[in-house]
Image: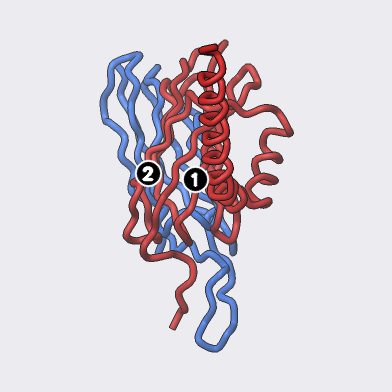
Chain colours: A blue, B red
Amino acid sequence: MASALINVPAKAKRGDIIEIKTLMSHIMETGYRHMASGEVVPRDIITSFTCRFNGNEIFRADLFPAIAANPFITFFTTATESGKFEFEWIGDQGFSETASASIMVE
Amino acid sequence: MQQRPNSSRRQFLGLAGGAAVLGVIPIVTVRPAEATPAMLASAIQSVTGGATVRTGKVKLDIPPLVENGNTVPMTVSVINPMAPEDHVRSIHVFNEKNPQPNIANFHLGPHNGRAQVSTRIRLADSQKIVAIARLSDGSFWSASVDVVVTLAACTEEVI
């Protein structure tokens, strides 16, 4: 159902600043919309996104209904050593997804 | 003898200038009245804890004219080194006229190398977007951008 797209360079030189792009498919229902019957559509958003590198948190974002559907987030990090990036999205109604990507640092 | 006409000319110019300023004042004062709703101010207050926020260092990239408010690309960057002793700790983005004043909080550290984050946001109306950066020394810096939105987000009905 939910799927993530991650873009991390496969290789980098030590000390390079690399860009990490992430996209998670999610409706991001704001909780402010109404159905034709007048009922409010309950809020269903991703509230937190975390990126860890070799177990250490390197980036975290708190998200609100003002983030567009399919949250796309890009950020930077310094390549220090080879290892694994782990991404985690947590949201309303028990939403929880993870993804990972590896990098070779020379 | 020559002082007199000179000074009356000055007085006249002074009065004329004053009248012109008075005429302009009502137009100028109307703008700030609608510019900062209390929700935006209190959301900023809850992040800064009342500390002074200076303008500068932060760069907020949003197209000034947006056709579709449902997905608006936004890039926020802070011109500051990312060294362990001096770095950007977090970036907070706020809006003025969406149902909620918060857009996102980004938590960074020295390992990020560059304090720059991009995402896509929703805008319910033409409004002001404010980005505030918190540095490791506890100071706050901000930037704001006015955006015109032609198709608003959040308001449409679900069928």
For the point 54% across and 27% down, the residue is: B55
For the point 49% across and 45% down, the residue is: B129
Pick whichever, B158 or A72, lies toward us: B158
> Which residue appears farthest toward the right when viewing the image?
B50
Relative placement, left or right, of B9 versus A105 is right
Q: Where does the N terminus of chain A fall, quadrant-wise?
A: bottom left
For the point 34% across and 55% down, the residue is: B66
The residue identified by callout 2 is B62
User: Quick check: A66 above or below A30?
Assistant: above
Residue B100: x %, y % from top left: 60, 56
For the point 62% across and 50% down, the residue is: B33
Residue B14 visible in the current orientation: yes
Q: Quadrant of residue B46?
A: top right
Pick whichever, A56 or B84, lies toward us: B84
Mark identifier at residue B26 = none
Residue A3 visible in the current orientation: no
- At label 2, the amino acid type is Ile
The residue identified by callout 1 is B129
Q: Chain of mark 1?
A: B
Q: Earlier in the sequence, mark 1 or mark 2?
A: 2
User: Quick check: B93 above or below B101?
Assistant: above
Residue B91: x %, y % from top left: 54, 34
Determine the secondary structure under disc 2.
loop
Pick whichever, A77 or A104, lies toward us: A77
- At label 1, the amino acid type is Ile
Residue A6: x %, y % from top left: 34, 43
Residue A102: x %, y % from top left: 35, 32
